[in-house]
Image (tube, rainbow, N blue to C red):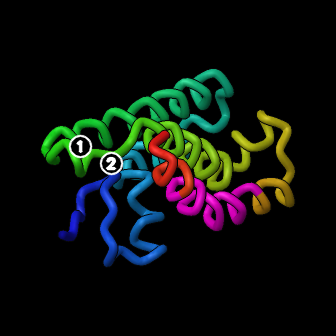
Amino acid sequence: MENDQPGGTSARDDYQTRLVKYIPGESLAFYAPLSSMVSENSAALVVATVIGVIGTILYLRQSARHLKDQEKPLPHYYVLSGFAFLIWAFSINQQFASLLGISSLWKSLFLACTIFLLPLVDDELGSRGV
């Protein structure tokens, strides 16, 4: 059975399809323009990022409410999604990366490693029932 809901995977989902399910479009639409507008204010940028992480998890949980119990993501999925959002947030916003002390090199490395490893970590934790 195929499941196209965020947080759900199916045998027919390819790697890229599963990867984009970690961060809902609502989170991207919220954070990208807002972070650009508040980039000069460190406190506002941190607040926007925290709201983005929380919103990402809440949107995914809301989407999962409509799924059958056996199709709902395991709890670790929400942690991975929040982590993915945070990596994406400092990858698209240089001011946020600078605030965290992350250079362009490390920013790129974190993003590439997250894209590569996140679905694999999800699969591993899922196979262990974590």
Q: Which three-letter amino acid code belongs to the residue tagged 2?
A: Glu
Considering the whole magenta stretch, tell me its main secondary structure: helix
Q: Which three-letter amino acid code belongs to the residue tagged 1?
A: Ala
Residue to which mark 1 is pinned = 64
Q: Does the stretch in magenta take in 26?
A: no
| Magenta segment boundaries in residue numbering | 110-123
Q: Which mark is residue 26?
A: 2
Q: Is residue 30 left or right of residue 8?
A: right
Nearer to me, 99 or 18: 18
Give the Cα distance between marks 1 and 2. 15 Å
Q: Is residue 26 left or right of residue 3?
A: right
**Label 2 residue SS:** helix
* Mark 2 surroundings within 10 Å by alpha-carbon count, few (fewer than 14), some (14 through 19), many (20 or more): few
Earlier-in-chain disc, 1 versus 2: 2
Picture residue at 38% right of the left edge, 42% below the top: 74
Percent x, y for residue 44?
57, 25
